[in-house]
Amino acid sequence: MSELAERVAPAAPAAPELLALGDDALIAAQRLAEWVSRAPTLEEDVALANIALDQLGAARLLLATAGDEDELAYLRDDHGFRNCLLVELPPGPARGDLDFGWTMAWLLMLSAAQLLRYTDLAADGDEPAAGIGAKAVKESTYHLDHARQWTVRLGGGTEQSRRRVQEALDGLWPYSHELTEGIRDRWLALVEPVLAEAGLTRPADRWRPDGGRAGRHTEHLSYLLAEMQSLHRAHPGAQW
């Protein structure tokens, strides 16, 4: 094993789960940050920036528990990341798009799963992971409510807004299976009432892309990491 691999290897029995949760939050933070200065309203710009910061804060705590947070964030290539595929998808049906309905459907799915994962972590009683889970539960509850409100608003809005958020759900739904492995029924109990309230149709369960937890990712993660890691890699060991 190389020196770098030894430094970024999980350090505790619980580290693989914490690493996956931390990677989900880290990549989600990066995706949400793409909305800064481009959200549909100033209020929503601030809201998405705050949710991104919440995700980043959770990621730092989780990665610091699993190993060295900076090395885990900046010195792994895409095959070393254990995030689910959903979080690395760009914020629109095609790379370069910024689709608000897509992001709200994405956040609804993600925040419901994170709320359940963090609730389980908080109940585990293993510190410091339980403390991280307890803090993150509060934040995820807000994230889920924010996504719920917008999903209902878009689903019950104009014909165009309802069509676009439904198309987003249809496109994202296959990725929800990897996201919710082991918690699927509980997750559906959170998500399905929102879809019903919004007048949206739950997509059928068909193909189920996966591999993110094993380090097999879409090309989108490579582009995201190239941007996220560029400064650290250009100035290794720099002190700020």
Image (cartoon, rainbow, N blue to C red):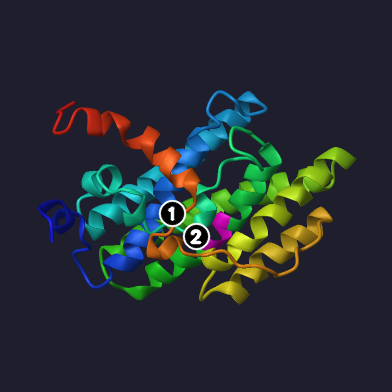
Tags 1 and 2 in contact by the CB under 8 Å rule? yes
Mark toward the start of the polypeptide (1 vs 2): 1
**Residue range corresponding to the magenta coloring:** 110-114
Q: Residue 94's image quarter?
A: top right
Query: Is residue 111 within the magenta segment?
Result: yes
Q: Mark number for residue 114?
A: 2
Give coordinates of residue 124: x percent, y percent. Answer: 35, 74
Q: Nearer the viewer, mark 1 or mark 2?
A: 1
The image shows residue 95, relative to residue 188, as above or below, that is: above
Residue in the picture at 68% in, 51% down: 148
Residue in the picture at 63% in, 33% down: 98
Q: Quadrant of the C terminus?
A: top left
Q: Is residue 158 visible?
A: no
The image shows residue 105, relative to residue 42, as above or below, that is: below
Residue carrying label 1: 24
The residue under label 1 is which amino acid type? Asp
The image shows residue 136, relative to residue 221, as above or below, that is: below
Query: Is residue 43 within the magenta segment?
Result: no
Residue in the picture at 49% in, 44% down: 220
Helix, strand or loop for disc 2: helix
Give coordinates of residue 215: x percent, y percent. Answer: 38, 60
Q: State left or right for residue 184 relative to residue 21.
A: right
Residue in the picture at 66% in, 26% down: 41
Q: CA distance from mark 1 to mark 2?
A: 9 Å
Give coordinates of residue 5: x percent, y percent. Answer: 17, 56
